[in-house]
Image: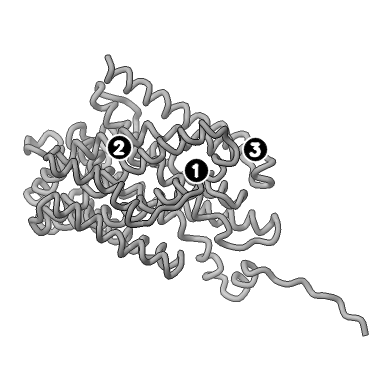
Amino acid sequence: MVTKDLPVASPLRTARARRPVRGRLILLGPAFVAAIAYVDPGNFATNSTAGARYGYLLVWVVVAANLAAMLVQTLTAKLGLATGRSLPELCRERLPRPLNRVMWAQAELVAMATDLAEVIGGAVALHLLLGVGLLPGGLIVGTAAFAVLALRARGFRTFEIAIAVLLGVIVLAFAVDLLTARPDLGATAGGLLPRMAGTDSMMLAAGILGATVMPHVIYVHSALTPNRVPTSDEAERRMVAKGLRVDVLIALGIAGAVNLAMLLVAATSFHGSGIPGTDTLEGVHAGLAGTLGTVAAVGFAVALLLSGLASTSVGTYAGEVIMQGFLRRRIPLLVRRTVTLLPALAVLAVGVDPTRALVLSQVVLSFGIPFALIPVVAFTRRRDLMGGLVNRRGTTAAAIGVTGLVVALNAFLLWQLVG
């Protein structure tokens, strides 16, 4: 009797057939790791400062930046899925060596600017909650990040779940603050009309953009999706790509809501109030205690601490992805953690205003965005790399538009600063 070989079901189809819900959940996770970087202490500083100084004026910037981030992260996730390689790895393979080295150098600077914001924010939070000095607080946050990073040894799902839990606590804290503040819905809607109020508001807009469309997390997200869920054919790759899009929409939708809540709470509580110092993190904490109560102030500080801890872990991982991808080299985690931690500790040691340092770090990140965005757009439009997941023309046009807007904004800011 002759028997025919039966087709072997792929792991993805097997999981979805046996456990439909779990089969869909296995596609979620990478974007939540990326999303924690979208609510890092830099976002706290830029959004709170924007709300305190300009009220609801820059609501549209937060919304536009989040929509741009969704597009960018969707392309980034798809790039890793289609090619099986991270963005830095593709740059090493496809770009001339001198250009690849320049890309690596700027990416390392971006990673340092990111760590600066995250460690400073966590140090400020410890000072607000427990009275710990800023320098010791920075050391504590930088060291504690190892505990979160250690979860990666137990598998990517454990690390992703831990980050998602921290994000959930941050969401809860700002939900309470937002419900207590009760922002003006009409003024919020009016803030969706694009407009500016001088160079300083432009600087803040660039900071919001840099804190939202963060270049280092573009590198990280592209490294989280290759070979994460084994696929056997084009239909399964499309299935996974669809799941990754849902992942991005959910995770970055949550992060965008938190960013908007930050601005709205500050705008409602502080703009035009005459309360001094509310364009700083310490002033926001004190102002919330006076206007919304102790619970709101403590929630703000706890969210800031968890944000710093989680995002600095992701930032350190970004450093690994950057060096391994661009240079194909690894250095011990302790050495990398120390090198990226030193600039933040130096800023804390010399007594630079933490909030000012945070805002400026986000402007630096904004200048790093084109170096990550341009290769993503260039690679995802190539059918020889992407296969059936290649961009549609409209997607590429939208991505080029976002990239052009970022470059134009950065050029304007540079002209203003030099002039």
Q: Which type of secondary structure does the marked residue at label 1 adopt?
A: helix
Point out which mark residue 326 bears: 1
Q: Which type of secondary structure does the marked residue at label 3 adopt?
A: loop
| Quadrant (top left/top right/bottom left/bottom right) for the C terminus | top left
Circle 2 residues within 10 Å: few <14, some 14–19, many ≥20 = many
Viewer can see residue 175 = no
Tell me which amino acid carries mark 1: Phe
**Residue at the location (50% across, 65% down)?**
25
- Of marks 1 and 3, the one in the foreground: 1
Rounded to the nearest angstrom, the CA distance separating label 1 from label 2 is: 23 Å
Point out which mark residue 215 bears: none
Point out which mark residue 362 bears: 2
For disc 3, the marked residue is 382
- In the image, taking residue 128 as reference, residue 59 lies left or right, namely right
Mark found first going from the N terminus, 3 or 2: 2
**Nearer-the-camera pick, 202 or 136:** 136
